Image (cartoon, rainbow, N blue to C red):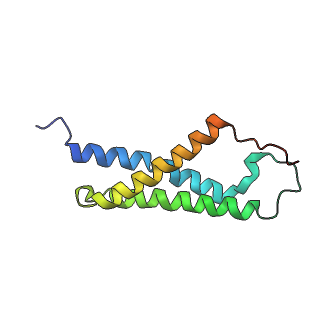
Amino acid sequence: MKDEISGKTALQLVVAVLAATPVVVGIEGIASGPEFLHTVPPRPIDLDSHFRFLSGLFLAVGIAWYSCVPGIETKTERFRLLAACTFAALAIHNRRTLAGSHRRPLR
């Protein structure tokens, strides 16, 4: 009886679990829009459109991660591209978090 799982199966499990985040957050962003930002109306006219578009991209990235799960050993290029996109997004997020996302007032 084999009690341990293979490296391939472990990687497939990790990718499948982690891909749920962009899928769930993307669906939530598309469905609710920028309501969670708690901005005082009137909001910029294009905020809702931009927010839902970016949420759709987030959803697409999550679905693309799920497309890597079956036959993961044959999808190296796709896996690397998605990993690069994910790490680039994390780098942008960390830069904004560490530097502060507030804007200086225009003079």
Residue that sits furthest to the left in the current view = 1
Q: Determine whether 64 is above or below 4 in the image.
A: below
Say which residue appears at 13% left-offset and 38% top-offset. Answer: 2
Q: Position of residue 40 (x, y in %)?
A: 87, 48
Observer-nearest residue: 73 or 89? 89
- Please tell me in which quadrant of the rendered image residue 71 appears: bottom left
Give the left or right position of residue 57, taking residue 104 as reference.
left
Query: Where does the image place residue 24, in percent across and percent down from the top left?
Result: 54, 52
Residue appearing at x 73%, y 47% in the figure? 36
The N terminus lies in which quarter of the figure? top left
For the point 41% across and 56% down, the residue is: 82
Q: Position of residue 15 (x, y in %)?
A: 37, 48
Relative to 97, residue 54 above or below: below
- Please tell me which residue is depicted at 82% across the width and 59% down the height of the picture: 44
Task: Provide residue 100's location: percent of width, then percent of height.
Answer: 69, 37
With respect to residue 64, does 92 lie above or below? above
Q: Residue furthest front?
A: 107
Closest to the observer: 9 or 104? 104
Number of numbered discs present? 0
Q: Nearer the viewer, residue 40 or 16?
A: 40
Q: Give the vertical position of 49 relative to 107 (above or below).
A: below
